[in-house]
C-alpha cells in the first residue's frame, strides 16, 4: 500500500524524537545512580597566586626569566606573560616545590592556593560523552539501514546535532584533563619604591626615559 508523505514524516519525527529523549534519559539516570564511581581516583584542580616585591623594576625581567626557566625545568610551559607578571603551568605534583622556589626570588606580599575537587564533574562529563558516543553509533547504524530518503535525512540531521554536542563535551574534557594534570602559578611583580610627592615626578621621568631605550 502507498504511504502518505505526512505518515512518513510523522514516523520519522517520532523516531528522531525518541532517540533524543532516550539519550537524555539514559544520561540522567546513569549520573544519578552512579555520581562518583568507586574506581575513580579523586581529581583536583590546583591554582596558586603570588605577589613578589622587588627593589626595582630593573629586576622584573631577570625574575621573570628565572620563573620561565623553572617552568621549563619542570616540563611545564608559559600560559601568559607581561612586563610585570607571568603565569606558568607545571605538573600538579610539582606545585609546592615550584611555588617555594619562586617565593625565594623576592619578598612575598600576597599569596593564595586554591584546590578544587572536580571528581564528580569529571565522572559526570565522562558518562555524558560515553552516552553520546553510543547514541552516535546507533544513529550511524540507522542511516545504513534506512528504508527511504526522508527517514535517512531525519536521522542524519539528528546525527549532526549529536556529533556537535559530542565534540563540545570532548573539548571540555580535554580542558579539564589539562587543568587536572597541570597546576597554575600566577606571579605578579611589584616594587618597594615609595618616593615623596616630588620624588614621584622624578621617578616618573626616569621610568619614561628608561623605557625609551628598551627595544629588545
Image: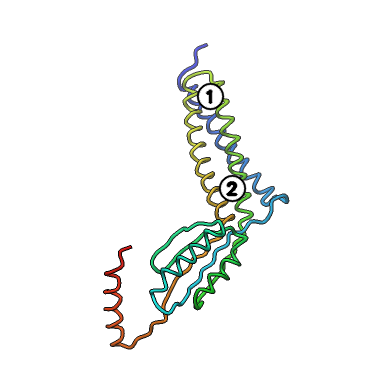
- The image shows residue 116 at horizontal and vertical percentages of 59, 62
Label 1 crowd (10 A; few <14 / some 14-19 / many >=20): some
Colour approach in the figure: rainbow
User: Which sits in the foreground, 38 or 70?
Assistant: 70
**Identity of the residue drawn at 50% across and 16% down:** 3
Label 2 crowd (10 A; few <14 / some 14-19 / many >=20): some
* Residue of label 1: 143
**Identity of the residue drawn at 54% across and 71% down:** 112
Where disc 1 sits, the SS reads: helix
Where disc 2 sits, the SS reads: helix
- The image shows residue 28 at horizontal and vertical percentages of 62, 45
**The image quarter in which residue 197 lies:** bottom left
User: Which sits in the foreground, 47 or 154?
Assistant: 47
User: Which sits in the foreground, 53 or 122?
Assistant: 53
**Mark seen at residue 26:** none
**Identity of the residue drawn at 51% across and 41% down:** 167
User: Which sits in the foreground, 36 or 181?
Assistant: 181
Q: What is the C-alpha distance between the residues marked 2 and 1?
A: 27 Å
Point out the residue furthest to the right here.
Answer: 38
Tell me the quadrant of the picture where the C terminus can be found: bottom left
**Mark seen at residue 125:** 2
- The image shows residue 152 at horizontal and vertical percentages of 50, 23
Amino acid at each position: 500500500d502507498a504511504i502518505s508523505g505526512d505518515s512518513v514524516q510523522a514516523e520519522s519525527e517520532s523516531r528522531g524524537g525518541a532517540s533524543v529523549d532516550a539519550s537524555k534519559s539514559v544520561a540522567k539516570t546513569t549520573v544519578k545512580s552512579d555520581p562518583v564511581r568507586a574506581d575513580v581516583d579523586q581529581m583536583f584542580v590546583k591554582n596558586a597566586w603570588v605577589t613578589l616585591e622587588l627593589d626595582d623594576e630593573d629586576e622584573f625581567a631577570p625574575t621573570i626569566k628565572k620563573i620561565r626557566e623553572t617552568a621549563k625545568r619542570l616540563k611545564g610551559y608559559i600560559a601568559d606573560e607581561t612586563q610585570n607578571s607571568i603565569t606558568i603551568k607545571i605538573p600538579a605534583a610539582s606545585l609546592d616545590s615550584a611555588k617555594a622556589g619562586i617565593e625565594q626570588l623576592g619578598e612575598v606580599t600576597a599569596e593564595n592556593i586554591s584546590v578544587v575537587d572536580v571528581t564528580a564533574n569529571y565522572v559526570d562529563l565522562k558518562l555524558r560523552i560515553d552516552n553520546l558516543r553510543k547514541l552516535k553509533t546507533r544513529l550511524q547504524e540507522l542511516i545504513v539501514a534506512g528504508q527511504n530518503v526522508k527517514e535517512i535525512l531525519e536521522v542524519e540531521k539528528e546525527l549532526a546535532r549529536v556529533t556537535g554536542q559530542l565534540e563540545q563535551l570532548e573539548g571540555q574534557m580535554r580542558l579539564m584533563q589539562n587543568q587536572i594534570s597541570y597546576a597554575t602559578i600566577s606571579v605578579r611583580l611589584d616594587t618597594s619604591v615609595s618616593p615623596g610627592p616630588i620624588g614621584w615626578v622624578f621617578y616618573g621621568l626616569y621610568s619614561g626615559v628608561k623605557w625609551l631605550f628598551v627595544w629588545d
